[in-house]
Amino acid sequence: MSDDTPTPDDVLDTQGLYCPEPIMMMHNKVRDLQSGQWLEVVATDPATQRDIPQFCSFLGHRLASQTEADGIFRYLIEIG
């Protein structure tokens, strides 16, 4: 992460899991966080490229970044 990227308050590792498990785990994780906190999600399921932005949009969270390298997807989300 770059110097201006916030440090996540929590990291959710969903590597090796496939839809719908990563989103179900995110639902549980965001309940533990407060508005303004940051969550990093690490995934290997390509469907998360579609599902996580929709999850954020629907529930009012801000997807600050979405990257992929070597089949690993990383999402930085500000909890709304």
Image (spheres, rainbow, N blue to C red):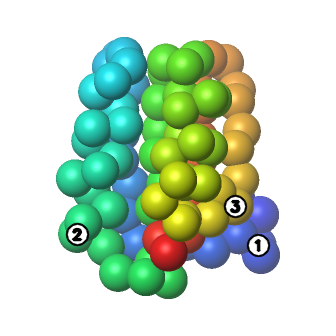
Quarter-wise, where is residue 67 in the image? Answer: top right
- List the residue tagged with mark 3: 64
Place of residue 26 in the rendered image (x, y in percent of width and height, measured from the top left)? 34, 47
Q: Residue at x 66, y 18 (%)?
A: 70
Q: Is residue 76 visible?
A: no
Quarter-wise, where is residue 1 in the image? Answer: bottom right
- List the residue tagged with mark 1: 3
Earlier-in-chain disc, 2 versus 1: 1
Place of residue 53 in the rendered image (x, y in percent of width and height, measured from the top left)? 62, 44
Type of residue at label 3?
Ala
* Label 2 element class: loop
Q: Residue at x 53, y 53 (%)?
A: 58
Q: Decide: marks 1, 3 in contact (CB < 8 A)?
A: no
**Nearer the observer, 43 or 7:** 43
Type of residue at label 1?
Asp
Q: Is residue 35 visible?
A: yes
* Label 1 element class: loop
Q: Residue at x 27, y 38 (%)?
A: 24
**Nearer the observer, 37 or 20:** 20
**Nearer the observer, 13 or 30:** 30
